[in-house]
Image: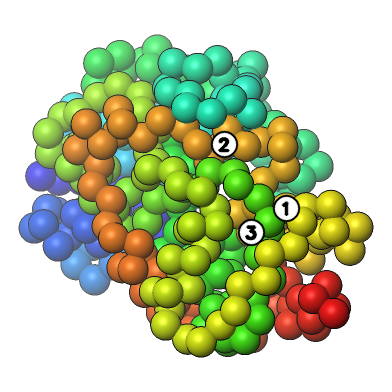
Amino acid sequence: MRILVLGGTKFVGHAVAADAVRRGHEVVCAARGASGAVPDGATLVKVDRDQPDGLNPLLGKGFDALVDIAPMSHSWVEHALGTLADEIEHWTFVSTISVYSDTATLGQTADAPTLAPRAEHGDLDNRMVDPDLYGAIKVASENAVRNRLGERAFIPRPGLITGPGDLSDRFGYWPARFARGGRVLVPEVGQLANYIDVRDFAAWIVDAAQRRLTGTLDAIGPAQPLPDLLAEIGEAVGVDHELVPVSPETLVAQGVSPWAGPKSLPLWLPETHLGMCAHDPEPALAAGLKVRPLADAVAGALDHERALGLDRERKAGLTPDEEAEVLG
């Protein structure tokens, strides 16, 4: 097949392009080329999605399938549809589990209510200012894709994505922390947690293009209690350590935040968002999503963390001094 990836120079898009190349497909990545290189074996076509004619270099190229990684721009999605929809047989739009309006209920599926759509162009760096904007733009973008393409559209909604290329620190913090060993501060909670390795997600997207899988599905792995997940991550890393559970009340009193941001503990969720990492994975698993063993996911994440630098300044997690202060 000839597969067009709108993106392809970082994280999910790069993983999709790399997986497709490994399978012998002809892969074109359409991007500015400023965020990184495309995988070996793929071809970069430079485009500018902010320009009215920015996708014109892709017209008439005979692509069989398209994967759009537009992060937070309804206008980019509409522009791509207006330019290329009539030429593409199978269209994947990568959405997000953040589209759901109910963040607390466990076990939801893709038919759960979503946020009101917002046909806007947003800035990923400003999501904390308007936390619903990311999901609301994705809802508007999903609607545009379905309205234009109908049964030709595949819309996966990933939850927390981890693995090579992840720069969020939300999962990678933990393998990196366990690699230091010693007393490891963990939240004393019983919430559920799940994730999807970017390599598994990418493989499912390429599978979907090959099989012409369509519809809207959550792209998530099975959930498990967070204490169990953290214990298994520690075991997979294999460095001597001691888990030290600390109550949410104590963490909040010490200025530690859940999930992300400075002085935070990733994977710990506030009570209002316990459903975000506990959607029902069965529809996706039944549709062919394959989830690698946790040890493989941890190894991939830790290799990536080491390449970035274990002691770097992070977007999420605790510094050694912050952790020591809470433990002290």
At x 53%, y 44%, the residue is 192
Q: Is residue 75 visible?
A: no
Secondary structure of residue under mark 1: strand
Q: Are the two marked residues, 1 and 2, in contact with CB atoms closer than 8 angstroms?
A: no
Give the numbered dot on residue 266.
3
Q: Is residue 256 left or right of residue 155?
A: right
Name the mark on residue 294. Answer: none
- Residue type at mark 3? Pro
Q: In terms of image quadrants, where is residue 38?
A: bottom left
- Residue closer to the observer: 33 or 24: 24
Q: CA distance from mark 3 to mark 2?
A: 13 Å
Verify CB contact (< 8 Å) between mark 3 and mark 1.
Answer: no
Q: Earlier in the sequence, mark 3 or mark 2?
A: 3
Which comes sooner in the sequence, label 3 or label 1? 1
Q: Position of residue 132 (x, y in %)?
A: 69, 32
Query: Could you classify mark 1 by the number of other residues whose Cα lies within 10 Å: few (under 14), some (14-19), or many (20 or more)?
Result: many
In the image shown, does 282 or 116 lie closer to the viewer?
282
> Which of 45/171 is in front?
171
Which image quadrant: the C terminus? bottom right
Q: Rate crowding at label 2 as few (under 14), some (14 to 19) or many (20 or more) other CA atoms within 10 Å.
A: many
Tell me what residue is drawn at x 42 percent, y 22 percent.
110
Q: Which mark is residue 258?
A: 1
Disc on the earlier residue, 1 or 2: 1
Residue 320 pos. (x, y %): 73, 82
Q: Secondary structure at mark 3?
A: loop
In the image, is residue 294 above or below residue 207?
below
Amino acid on which the number 1 mark rests in the picture: Pro
Reply above or below: 151 against 39. above
Instruction: Tell me the residue that label 2 is attached to.
Output: 276
- How much space separates mark 3 and mark 1, taking CA atoms? 6 Å
- What is the C-alpha distance between the residues marked 1 and 2? 13 Å
